[in-house]
Amino acid sequence: MDGIFLQQMINGLTLGAVYGLIAIGYTMVYGIIGMINFAHGEVYMISAYLAAISLAVLAYFGLESFPLLILGTLLFTICITGVYGWVIERVAYKPLRNSTRLAPLISAIGMSLVLQNYVQISQGARQQGVPTLLEGAFKLNIGEGFVQLTYTKVFILIAAFVGMALLTYVIQYTKLGRMCRATQQDRKMASILGINTDRVISYVFVIGAAMAALAGVLITMNYGTFDFYAGFIIGIKAFTAAVLGGIGSLPGAMLGGLILGVAEAQFSGMVNTDYKDVFSFSLLVLILIFRPQGLLGRPHVAKV
Amino acid sequence: MSEAIVLSVDRLAMHFGGIKALNDVSLTIKRNSISALIGPNGAGKTTVFNCLTGFYSATGGSIKLNARGRTTDVIKVLGEPFEPGDFISPAKFCSRLYYKMFGGTHLVNRAGLARTFQNIRLFKEMSVVENLLVAQHMWINRNLLAGVFNTPGFRKAESQALDHAFYWLEVVDLVDCANRLAGELSYGQQRRLEIARAMCTRPQIICLDEPAAGLNPQETEALSRIIRLLRDDHDQTVLLIEHDMGMVMSISDHIVVLDHGLVIAQGGPEAIRNDPKVIAAYLGADEEELV
Amino acid sequence: MSSTLASKRFDVKKSLVDAVLAGLIALIVFGPIVGVVLDGYAFNLQPDRVAAMIGAVMLGRFVLSLFLQTPRGLAILAGFETVGSGVHVRDPGYQSHLRWVLPLLVVVALVFPFFASKYLLTVVILGLIYVLLGLGLNIVVGLAGLLDLGYVAFYAIGAYGLALGYEHLGLGFWSVLPLAALAAALAGGLLGFPVLRMHGDYLAIVTLGFGEIIRLVLNNWLAFTGGPNGMSVPAPTFLGLEFSRRAKDGGVPFHEFFGIDYNANFKFLFIYLVLLLVVLLVLYVKNRLTRMPVGRAWEALREDEIACRAMGLNHVLVKLSAFMIGASTAGLAGVFFASYQGFVNPASFTFFESALILAIVVLGGMGSTVGVVLAAFVLTVAPELLRSFAEYRVLLFGVLMVLMMIWRPRGLIRVSRNGVQPRQGVAP
């Protein structure tokens, strides 16, 4: 096995774990109200800004230990991004619950434009960045080259894994998770049984936003830079991951994220970096054509 | 296949994942007859309908539709998955590929079978006449250039389509509603409009999914009259799912009883009324108690 | 929400509580992003902006809350519950007032460029290009109900078709015009055929991805498309006569051939007139389409796909026809855009452009083609005239799209349908 392959494998897995976290937001919302939340990528973008702001503020107050910094940033970012998720649902989607099929999609596009431009106006169009928080890396010599696994990447993998495990626990074993699953199966029946489905839908948006926030903090740590346009491309890619894994399925979103991340990293390692986005988008088109139900999803049977 | 048989279903099976909705359903429908499909809820009546009309691709068995002077294999035109044999014979491969690309439910309708839906599916925000014109899509001048330049041929075809539409509106007594939105009509009117729309596709067999559901006795009576008219004056074969036993017994020539995905009895109304298996599974001891 | 139906007409306390809650949420949401502006790894505080925004949100929520307690507000709230309102069928003998206005407008449009300044002419040309784009997308989104978010890709195919056709094949404006429409339609067909048989929402994301693919390829394929620097586009000619002061290769320029004085506006005048003809043609075709079988089939598919399949309509091909006709219109617009601008580069074909065209359709699609034409001018010409306002343009489009969907979700649908003279006595 050569070094580049292994290095790209590591890069791909880290990136894929993060795609998986964002894909959860798409897949949960799609599962519960059958709508593609186009504004989800922008939620991720906002969380990246929030993470940078939180780091800057904490550093201003002289906080320097990594665990405290990252804990504070995660807490702050996840909470505020969760509120964003709630507000977006309340403003742009909830009034459209019984509207035409196209209305929520268009409203989501509008919301996405609003968020992008709002951040651009308030924070300026220039690229933003955060300092490297964790220095150092494991190094491994292979043949002529070496493979490098930075501590940041290790942290990202662990954090993403913990986030997913936590979410799986919430969905599988708590009352909230049960309500979510019931609403996903049959919204009308769930509301007849006394579940406040509107509230469940709000929770789903908050959970999705929180996962995107985790992803936002992690990606910001890894790459260090971002701008107001960052949500667009990552949003489509995370959606690709959700479709790849089977939209509506939580494990599918995580699996799809990992596969997409690795495939994309290997493509840029072996073929061409310029066309890695083209590769991901083409993958999306091909999956939708040949296996629209994804890897773990169920085929769609139209009700007549 | 004999000319007298318009639809023959042989050993039809339909499985959804692990659930076996239909196990072994065989039935034949005679031309120019009224047949009814009855059975308790969950017996698989609507699944049979959806298989016949091409909305579900059946798991096994065969459905042969003998209308418009040719025999159509309903399962084949929906586009089956490829089989190993296809990769040896190019002709089979091409036909399979063709139906996979261009096949589908619409070919069943074009073969001469029309249907209505249990929960009404009209084009609610289009006018009543437009609903009927859409149904005649295959029968009018679809040439883009003719339409854009509004040629005499195009106008003539449109006018004929309108004649046809108003003909059926008159049959179902909706001429006064011609310029209203389909969604504004009353429930009974919508049911009748759906039948008219199905008839506008000029089928030879029409499948009605619970046409009398939610109608009052007068409306049911009018519906029975329309169904008889379809058979007697328009050479139609009618197949219907219905729970209103009074109506079923009075208009049907042939009744098929379904239970748990199996045909448990078929025959004329008298025979079915007295069949012990049917009484046990569906009709109950005393027919008068039925609603 | 409807718990405000109390005996009292105005529950000011409730409105106040609503306003305070909204203010709190606004503080959480806007506080960090608006109030703390990143500056390198440090930050600047801007509390005044946050205060202003929170104030605006609280005031807005308070007024909205009060308004929703008035009878009119209650009526609007109730209006959300009902579906299918607002569409009506015209009387059979109905004739639009537009038949008087339209010829007048056409005459004005034909005479206008001879008196306009070059700047005004270019602005109006841009407006007309967006009219063309809006009309095309209106067929796809408004009539067929397909959300195409990569519409700009077909626009790019038209524009780059002209640049590449000139560079590699020596084709000019006139030969590319039909070819670009054809190429865009073909691309739409290739993309649409596999995708259109699937669940409707996937189309939106696939077209979004397709639009990005086209833009990225244009951006990265330096040898073929010139990459981010773009390509130059030949000026259009009239029967082989050029509009420049001196013709290349010893030809005769337009003004010398006809013996008139040279005018730098000639090129734009020419583009304007051809564009106007194409727009009028597309308007006419679109008007006809709604009365043709295929137009009816599009709308029927939008209403109920399953019923359409039961009527013998091949839903894939019918949708594909709408998708391809829409794409070819964008291809046409692209050719005009390229000749108008004189060069093309990938920056003109970003997702924002697709969103702008969608905003035109959403705002203008209030049931009529006229709406699209007006919206195209409002959304493209107004920002051109109000430069200082440009920063907020995208924000406004976004807000507009959300609000339109909340208040007029059916704005996309044709609200007045053609009536038909009833025919009696066709049945026995």
Image (cartoon, coloured by chain):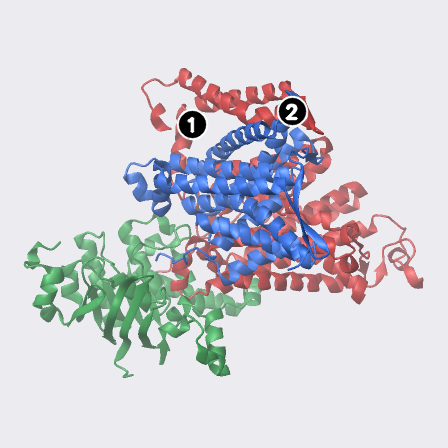
Chain colours: A blue, B green, C red
Q: From the image, which quarter does the N terminus of chain A lie in?
A: bottom right
Circle 2 residues within 10 Å: few <14, some 14–19, many ≥20: some
Pinpoint residue B7: horizontal percent, then vertical percent. Answer: 28, 75
Type of amino acid under label 2: Ala
Residue at image x 37%, y 60%? C423
Q: Residue at x 65, y 29 (%)?
A: A122
What's the CA distance linking mark 1 and mark 2? 49 Å
Residue B49 appears at what percent x and percent y? 29, 65
Q: Is residue B7 left or right of residue A291?
A: left
Do discs 1 and 2 belong to a common subunit? no
Judged left or right of residue C65, residue B169 is left
Q: Which residue is more in the foreground, A163 or B28?
A: A163
Residue C372 appears in the rendering: no
Residue furthest left as drawn: B286
Q: Which residue is mark 1?
A: C73
Name the secondary structure under disc 1.
Answer: helix
Which residue: 32% across, 37% down? A195
Residue A56 picture location, percent across and down: 65, 26
Q: Report in which chain the residue with disc 2 lies.
A: A
Identify residue for label 2.
Answer: A59
The image shows residue A35, relative to residue B27, as above or below, that is above
In this rendering, the label closer to the viewer, 1 or 2: 2
Q: Residue furthest right?
A: C250
Identity, as a three-letter code, of the amino acid under mark 1: Gly
Instruction: State the quadrant of the C terminus of chain A.
Output: bottom left
